[in-house]
Amino acid sequence: MSFIRPTFRHPDLPTNKIGYSRQDYEGALSTLCAGCGHDSVSGAIIQACFDMAIEPHRVAKLSGIGCSSKTPAYFLNNSHGFNSVHGRMPSVATGANLANRDLMYLGISGDGDSASIGMGQFVHAIRRNLNITYILMNNGCYGLTKGQDSATADVGSVNKSGHANQFSAIDMAGLALEMGATFVARSFSGDKHQLIPLIKAAMSHPGFALIDVVSPCVTFNNNPGSTKSYDYTRDHIETTAAMDYVPYQSEITAAYDEGNSVDVALHDGSFIQLHKLSPNWNPFDRHLAMNRVFEAKVKGEVLTGLIFIDQNHPDLHAMLDTVATPLNQLEQRNLVPGAGVLEGINAGWR
Amino acid sequence: MHKLSGLNDFVVRFANVNGTGSASANTMFAKAIFRMGIPVSPKNIFPSNIQGLPTWYEVRVNDRGYLGRRDGIDVMVSVNPQSMKKDIAAVKAGGYFLYDNTKALPNELHRDGIHYLGVPMMGLCMEQFTDPRQRQLLKNMVYVGALTALLDIEVEVIQQIIREQFKGKEKLVNPNFEALQLGMQYVQEHFEYPLDLKVERRDLVGDRILIDGNTASGLGALYAGATVAAWYPITPSTSLVQAFEKYANKLRIDPVSGKKNFAVVQMEDELAAIGVVLGASWNGARAFTATSGPGISLMGEFLGLAYFAEIPTVLIDVQRGGPSTGMPTRTQQSDILAAAYASHGDTRHVLLFPSTPKECFDFTADAFDLAERLQTPVLMMTDLELGMNDTMSEPLTWDENRQYDRGKVLSESALEEMTTRFGRYKDVDGDGIPYRTIPGAHPTKGAYFTRGTSHDEYAGYTEDATVYQASVERLLLKWETAKSIVPAPEQYQTSYQSNLGILFFGTTTQPALEAIDLLREEGIELDAMRVKAFPFTESVRHFLENHDQVFVVEQNRDAQFRSLLVNELEINPKQLTKILNYDGFPITADFISTSILERVHALKAV
Ligand SMILES: Cc1ncc(C[n+]2csc(CCOP(=O)(O)OP(=O)(O)O)c2C)c(N)n1
Ligand code: SF4
Ligand SMILES: [Mg+2]
């Protein structure tokens, strides 16, 4: 059941650059369990879109099936949404994006949705560098079907029913790097200071931007022994770099030590300012990033932050060499070669 | 010994090894006869393999314009030692066996009652040409030359085709001419020619074309304004998307930027292919995919979503032999039920059944209009026979006045003027078809949440029994609306003449029409109907109800089309007699007429 929020808006609510209040970015009331990590991610999405002054109707939000995939109903009410089928959101998003390259695409998925049933579509969307912000709400379990282990559950992680997982865990950030993802980040639903700027940066990235968000399931996988619980994550979090998302270069104010800070110019004119926590970390080096992710996995750390970015790789439209006009706006006269041409074609078949 | 005779009425079968370049020589042969104004009907019979296995190419030449396959081979052109024994056995008594006698034919391959015409195809090429690969290819032209003399084909016509074929590779024209000449000359020096089986120029082809259905479908999608094509390779549908892409690369390039007004993506599987179609259609582009049986199975879940969430979806099913991987390079009409009711829950889909390349073109274009008008999946059901064989057809035409029917889409201004709340699944017009909006249309109005879960008129999630039931019943009302806009069946009589009827669809049409003529010669008159679409219109019911017996002719084991008729129209099954061919070869007129004859005699005996 979704509940519609009252539309009354307080006249004094702060508004963003385009005159929208935060409320304009909200959705229906959530029906997820109280304390579910996914709701915090929804909150971060709302905040990011408000801060960036995105017009909600210029966003298309798509998801698969799962508690996580329900969340698009709970943010951006004025965006078109598409809750598709389990594990197949990437293909639907691919079609949507091909039809209109001018909208922003926000894909929401779960670890069951992307690491099991939808693994094929996940990796292939990455290979094509589909221009999408792909938020994977990762709780190590299947929330909606009541807590079975997912393929991202760590070996030895114990779920609510006391069962310890034996099967090797898939690291979605590591996998995405391997598949050629052009933006790979990891975060934690409980750390909105990190998550919000990452979402902004991902939405500014012209290609496939994965944010693997550890997002605990309070009902089935937040117990001691689980490696996707709030406590475990807080205790084991490691960060590549603190970061700020800076909408315009002119606004850069904070000064950081030379050599310890990296500015990443994004294509839409905004910037990411990274404050490296480790001096030999470099967000432009896929090889290093893969090593670092692997290392963290071995140590049982939850490595968060922006892990890798490559802004210069062509996206799917560039690779297909499609026109700048969205394909869904081409008119019949652009599309029909004409009766005369068809007569010529007929002649070739005689 | 008896010699077969026939003027413009015979069947030639070529027995080749695939991957040896025979296909293009064989096509030239068929095209030459076609250009002499005589109707031809070529069929490929090929294995699921790339190189080294037997393939056959069968050309029926027929003055009366019958395009179905005919039983019995009058002339066998044998260049494949592997299948020789079988090929010899397939020749009709009094028929001809043209073979390469560079090496002598083993004694056990001699059969009484047929005529052997040995031409040293390879030997002649060895003497004339030096390059081994060229020898292999030109050997094919030698047998074309032999046939030219034997069947009295106009040599200038073949030469012209050779010139066109090698346009831009002029170096190859002369060797091909020489090889052609070698074959002709050998026949002229060694046999009585032409045979009593031969061709003679006619004017029976008019402006018709010889084109494969897949190319025509691909062109249909192009003219219909498809901008997104997503697919996964599978025989026999592959060439359809490839044709779309080939023509789009020529005809859909933006004149200013040189960029593409379309996108073709080869996806990771059929689930993803249909997912792309849903996403693109949802977002307001015209999109399609093409597949065959196994792909239809994989697309089931998404087809249910498209049906329930009401997303226009165009899917072309080029059917092949099933079940499972089945006979991937043989033809069947065996996905009928899987397509009609694809997906779980109560679902049903609009199907179109083209029977000629022209209809492949027209119905593909219609599929886009229907899918957008009805906001539902439309599956065009063609098959390997139509899709992959050059078929004589009326030329493709496009009416310049035709306007795409984009269906009920609310524009930005329509939304702006709206005073009531937009309800995505609200039946405003009473025809079961709601209005939709395209993402990005309007800043504050028109957004909705598309879902495969049960929803109310505003696309909100609901578990309310009444609301759910009303929503699935509205889909039935939409189904009724569909009946009034899908292509109506073709009737072959102005009023019913007989208490017996014959009903067919798709590629069964040509042989069925011929069978009707054959049966008339036997004194059996049949009323005929060709169904072009599902849901069935009232006229289909009328036809069935007004005949004591209707022969339902189809190419599958389980009489799937008949089941659909019985189920949808609640017709007494006893009234519908199954005429079924499911060996993977195109059904023939002889098979249909003999089967019907037997049944009619049995009926009379009762
Ligand atoms: C084809 C198919 N199989 C199974 C299901 C049942 N199902 C619904 S959600 C889900 C798992 C969801 O897990 P995840 O993506 O991790 O989402 P979470 O609920 O944990 O957020 C499953 C198996 C389904 N909807 N469709
Ligand atoms: S079951 Fe778990 S994942 Fe689902 S809503 Fe509840 S807490 Fe969240
Ligand atoms: Mg999960």
Image (cartoon, coloured by chain):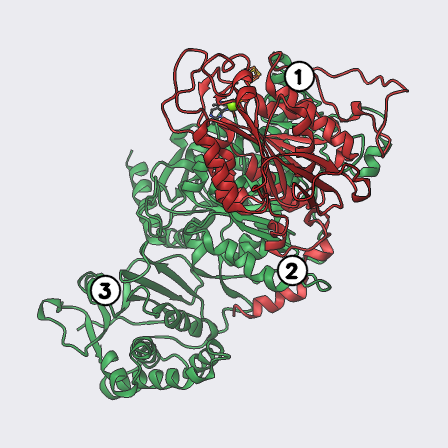
Residue B217: image x %, image y %?
Answer: 54, 54
Q: Colour of chain A?
A: red
Q: Which mark is residue A30?
A: 1
Image location (x, y in percent) of residue B259: 66, 60
- Between disc 1 and disc 2, the foreground one is 1
Above or below for A250 versus B245: above
> Residue flagged by tag 2: what amino acid is it?
Arg
Quarter-of-image position of residue A319? bottom right
Neighbor class of circle 3 (other Cα within 10 Å; few <14, some 14-19, many 20+) is: many
Between circles 2 and 3, the one closer to the viewer is 2
Identify the residue shown where x is 40% and y is 70%: B24
Mark 1, Cα crowd under 10 Å, few <14 / some 14-19 / many 20+, is many
* Residue type of the residue flagged with mark 1: Ser
For the colour green, the matching chain is B
Find numbered disc 3 in the image and state the secondary structure of the residue it sits on. Answer: strand
Q: Return the chain for callout 1.
A: A
Q: CA distance from mark 1 to mark 3?
A: 75 Å
What numbered label is drawn on residue A154?
none
> Is residue B107 shown left or right of residue B137?
left
Towards the viewer: B24 or B580: B24
Discs 1/3, front: 1
Residue denoted by label 3 = B91
Q: Which residue is mark 2?
A: B252
Q: Quadrant of the N terminus of chain B?
A: bottom left
Q: Is residue B562 left or right of residue B304?
A: left
